[in-house]
């Protein structure tokens, strides 16, 4: 293979063309060809297949080129659907999305708790079936499901390493079991990466294709998207920012590191810090309320320390990856999301090394509780339509 061969762009698959139409449509064949390595003739062939399969439709004409109007293409939102499942400790969130990434149905259910994995799978499968019934569409166009769990995951065996009763889950093939129970193809992803995909697929990033999400649930993780594609790493566990040390002399974490971000900034850590400071135990939501609305100085102190620790970690992430957008998402932030975003923005503005070249915006997700489930559904759609 020559250097020229290595440098030559690879022709995109049909799924890549469909994604371009979905994200940028209405768009013409000429514009699609210009954005890819395909010739106009080859692009026409791919588009013809997409139209034949009912995934894309012609929706009118654009600005004429050399006197000939361009026919515009758009993905059909009702052509395919998929289900996303965010399986957590205390609760499970379900969403169904169409081809545009719009949430068309959703429901909540019980979390994994301490139940045996097989019991959890049966319960999740029942809830997935109920959600599909609510869609009131031909089940044949429901392409699959994406199950999302706290990281790390074993993407080869399809196991969830960090769910409750760790050993039974780490030995349990969740992906295969859920596929068998639902009769659907199932993909699996960690919650932080899925949240990033959900933000992108739903167009919430407003065209920004290189960005990061910080997902806070029980713990903290980062999802990273580069050029519209999730960055997964060697084992699909990239982005474990919660186990980045922010205090070398800090407490020992279960991961083996000291002073991990989670031990300072996660809700459980803030609750512990408040109790150690005051001798009183308050829930995370009560500490947030005390800090932001009731003038509790101790609550302000522990919440500020948590937000500033996260800001330092986000600044390091931005310096490493040179992203232009960071989105805070996940139920864990709760009412403190804006406070965390403001403190992180101040940290980035002060210490982002390349700040003279471009700004970095830190913002809060419009749908923090369902971004990860939406991402799971989006990944299921992309997997089913690949090829």
Image (cartoon, grey):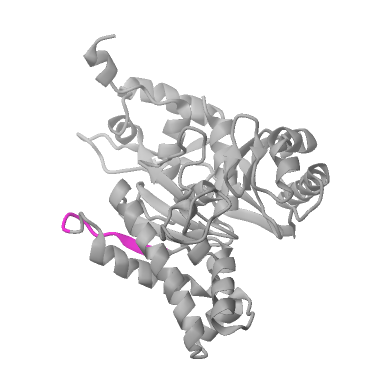
Q: Could you tell me which residue is drawn at 49 percent across and 36 percent down?
A: 56
With 91 as the anchor, is 101 left or right in this view?
A: left
Q: Residue furthest top?
A: 1
Count the marks: 0
Query: Which residue is more in the foreground, 242 or 381?
Result: 242
With 234 as the anchor, is 188 left or right in this view?
A: right
Query: Which residue is more in the foreground, 91 or 280?
Result: 280
Q: Residue furthest bottom?
A: 295
- Percent from the top left, x then y, of residue 383? 56, 33
Q: Quadrant of the N terminus?
A: top left
Please name the predominant secondary structure of the magenta segment in the image.
loop
Residue 218 found in image quarter: bottom right
Q: Could you tell me which residue is drawn at 51 percent across and 82 percent down?
A: 299
With 329 as the anchor, is 284 left or right in this view?
A: right
- Percent from the top left, x then y, of residue 353? 21, 56
Q: Is residue 323 magenta?
A: no
Residue 42 found in image quarter: top left
Q: Which residues are magenta?
A: 356-363
Q: Could you tell me which residue is drawn at 55 percent across and 48 percent down?
A: 255
In the depicted structure, whether residue 43 falls above or below residue 89: above
Q: Is residue 173 visible?
A: yes
- Percent from the top left, x then y, of residue 283? 63, 76
- Percent from the top left, x then y, of residue 329? 50, 60
In the depicted structure, whether residue 266 falls above or below residue 48: below
Q: Is residue 199 visible?
A: no
């Amino acid at each position: 293979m020559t250097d020229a061969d290595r440098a030559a762009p690879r022709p995109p698959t049909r799924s890549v063309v469909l994604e371009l139409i979905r994200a940028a449509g209405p768009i013409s064949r000429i514009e699609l060809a210009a954005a890819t390595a395909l010739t106009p003739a080859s692009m026409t062939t791919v588009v013809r297949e997409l139209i034949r399969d009912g995934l894309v439709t012609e929706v009118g004409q654009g600005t004429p080129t050399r006197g000939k109007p361009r026919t515009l293409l758009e993905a059909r939102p009702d052509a395919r659907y998929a289900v996303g499942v965010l399986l957590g400790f205390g609760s499970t969130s379900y969403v169904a999305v169409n081809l545009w990434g719009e949430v068309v149905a959703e429901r909540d259910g019980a979390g994994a708790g301490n139940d045996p994995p097989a019991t959890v799978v049966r319960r999740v499968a029942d809830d997935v079936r109920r959600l599909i019934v609510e869609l009131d569409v031909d089940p044949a166009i429901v392409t699959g499901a994406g199950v999302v769990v706290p990281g790390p995951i074993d993407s080869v065996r399809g196991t969830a390493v960090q769910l409750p009763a760790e050993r039974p889950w780490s030995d349990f093939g969740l992906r295969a079991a859920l596929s068998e129970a639902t009769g659907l193809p199932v993909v699996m992803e960690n919650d932080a990466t899925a949240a990033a995909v959900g933000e992108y697929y739903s167009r919430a990033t407003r065209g920004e294709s290189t960005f990061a999400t910080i997902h806070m649930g029980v713990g903290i993780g980062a999802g990273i998207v580069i050029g519209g594609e999730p960055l997964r790493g060697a084992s699909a566990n990239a982005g474990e920012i919660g186990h980045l040390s922010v205090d070398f002399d800090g407490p020992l974490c279960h991961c083996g590191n000291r002073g991990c971000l989670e031990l300072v900034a996660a809700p459980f850590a803030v609750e512990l810090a408040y109790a150690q400071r005051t001798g009183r135990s308050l829930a995370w939501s009560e500490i947030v309320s005390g800090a932001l609305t009731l003038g509790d100085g101790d609550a302000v102190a522990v919440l500020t320390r948590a937000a500033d620790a996260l800001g330092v970690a986000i600044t390091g992430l931005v310096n490493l990856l040179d992203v232009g957008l960071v989105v805070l998402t996940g139920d864990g932030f709760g009412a403190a999301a804006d406070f965390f975003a403001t403190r992180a923005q101040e940290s980035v503005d002060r210490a982002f090394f390349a700040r003279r070249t471009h700004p970095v915006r830190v913002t809060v997700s419009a749908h923090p509780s369902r971004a990860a489930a939406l991402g799971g559904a989006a990944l299921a759609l992309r997997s089913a339509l690949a090829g």
